[in-house]
Amino acid sequence: MATPAELAQLHAVLEPDELLHLQRLLGSWSLLADLSFSDLVLVVPVSGLEGGPGGFQMVVLGQIRPNNRPTRLNQDLVGQSPSEDDWSIVSEALRRGELVRGDIEGISPAGPIASEAIPVRFGHKVIGVLVRIGREEVRPATSSYERTYLDAFDRLAAMVSESAFPFPEADVGTEEAPRVGDGVVVVDDEGRVEFASPNAMNAFHRMGVYSLPEGRRFVDLGVEESAVEWALTTARPVVEEVERRPDVMVLVHCIPLVTHGSVTGAVILLRDVTDVRRLDRLLLSKDAAIREVHHRVKNNLQTISSLLRLQARRVPAKAGREALHEAERRVRSIALVHEILSREPGDQVSFDEIVVSLVQMANDSVVGPSKVEIGVEGDLGDLPADVATPLAVTLAELLQNAVQHAFVVDRRPLRTGRPTKRKAAGVKNQVGRVGVMLAHDSDRLAIEVRDDGIGLPKGFDIERTNSLGLSIVRDLVVSQLDGSIEMRGVPKVDGGGTLVRIEVPTGPRR
Ligand SMILES: Nc1ncnc2c1ncn2[C@@H]1O[C@H](COP(=O)(O)OP(=O)(O)OP(=O)(O)O)[C@@H](O)[C@H]1O
Ligand SMILES: [Mg+2]
């Protein structure tokens, strides 16, 4: 189904702020439907008031049913163009800019339905018509609650035609809009309660107020009054959450009733949100528990890496020592991801932060005279932990390789004991450069690590190497993440060095 914005665009007669006003009306009109016990339909003109040769055209932008009465409209009218003959009260309301009462034909098999067309003004311009379908439902109102609701509706309808409702600060979204069924209180211009619905009485009871509210102000009842007072003095709507006892929360939504610019009272919707908030709190504490677990995992990993470091000190053989150091570094790169997860809610990690720490780690492991500069471009955005962890380890390996192998003076330092003639580019230029390029779009991630060092050894093939670092990378990227690795030397003319490119799909399930 088309959204109001799409429908309006399709028919292109509304200015953006006019459309926004109508969207606000759609966001807050459940109140109007319930107070009037009627189906409401919002209609906008399509081709100007005069109309073309085919007559004046209109389109239905929205439709809502009351929660407290059976609907009169079984069909969905949104997007339809009602005929001017059947909906003549609507075109009349548009032309005259006044409320018009009369029958609407052709929408019910039971025959014409007595309805009301209320012009919707924005500034001085009539931009649409709010149609209340089923006016005859409203006999001379019998109960006081029907009378109160209908009176409140009439006052709000007058505000709609005076451009005073919806309020400019009303939300466009409809999800959180409170409904009359939650509990409604009507107060006069001094904040004295004229009427409280049974559900509002329940909310008062939950707040510990048992005396009859009629004729009294919220303060007299012992209820926080600032929201009501604010709405009455500023003529602006207010939403406030009142916490009465530690375990009772009531959402107070005050809508001032404004007649010709002055406030004559307010409709107050009360909603007991205790259970909702309790659930929120539970969720929050579950979130906190998950963060705590990540925190502990990180601590444990850091302990493991410290143990490895301690152990490395006691190993006399250099190769063994180095192996333990490598293991320590790998554990630390996994700990990084858990550290970030322990700080942020949810299971998404900002990969940027991980990259900063990994670069720092690589810089710290640069030894000897060579200087290496590592630059980062682009980002991978927020990633789920099960993608971020293998990618963090992968990037750590690639950076480590760049700082460890690309800028050495001698490829075979241990075997020959003397430097070869082949000089590393980085050493020649004094500074070796490593560039990390990150990119992502809707269905894949790409990481590129490029250095301007000595390039790969002759005959090197990533598919066949069985050295540990790249085997880990291959396992993580290809087997775990279903991605691909390309690793090649960069020709001298293009600056030399090595380029590694990793691509990982991010579809629904890799
Ligand atoms: N950026 C690079 N520049 C030059 N040579 C590289 C680069 N990256 C990798 N190599 C070569 O590829 C080899 C394999 O790398 P790999 O990471 O698998 O093992 P390693 O770094 O030697 O040991 P480790 O298991 O500790 O990582 C390296 O020994 C090195 O010769
Ligand atoms: Mg390596």
Image (cartoon, helix red, strand yellow):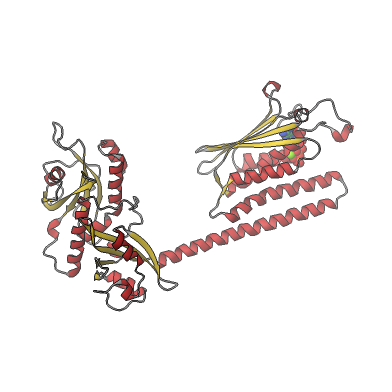
In the image, taking residue 418 as reference, residue 401 lies left or right, namely left
Q: Ligand 1 is in which quadrant of the figure?
A: top right
Q: Is residue 66 visible?
A: no
Q: Looking at the picture, how far across and down is residue 329, in whole percent?
A: 73, 47
Q: In the image shown, does 177 or 240 lie closer to the viewer?
A: 240
Residue drawn where x is 11% and y is 42% of the image = 85
Q: Quadrant of the C terminus?
A: top right
Q: Looking at the picture, how far across and down is residue 44, in whole percent?
A: 22, 42
Residue drawn where x is 89% and y is 31% of the image = 418
Q: Identify the residue at the far bottom of this view.
A: 211
Q: Picture quarter containing residue 342? A: bottom right
Q: In the image shown, does 25 or 299 lie closer to the viewer?
A: 25
Q: Is residue 434 above or below residue 34?
A: above
Q: Quadrant of the N terminus?
A: top left
Residue drawn where x is 68% and y is 34% of the image = 434
In the image, taking residue 254 as reference, residue 348 lies left or right, namely right
Q: Picture quarter containing residue 257? A: bottom left
Q: Is residue 508 above or below residue 179?
A: above
Q: In the image shown, does 358 or 155 lie closer to the viewer?
A: 155
Q: In the image shown, does 245 or 481 lie closer to the viewer?
A: 245
In the image, taking residue 445 as reference, residue 492 lies left or right, namely right
Q: Is residue 41 visible?
A: yes
Q: How many marks?
A: 0
Q: Picture quarter containing residue 420? A: top right
Q: Looking at the picture, how far across and down is residue 272, in whole percent?
A: 36, 67
Q: Looking at the picture, how far across and down is residue 50, in whole percent?
A: 14, 35
Q: Identify the residue at the far top of this view.
A: 493
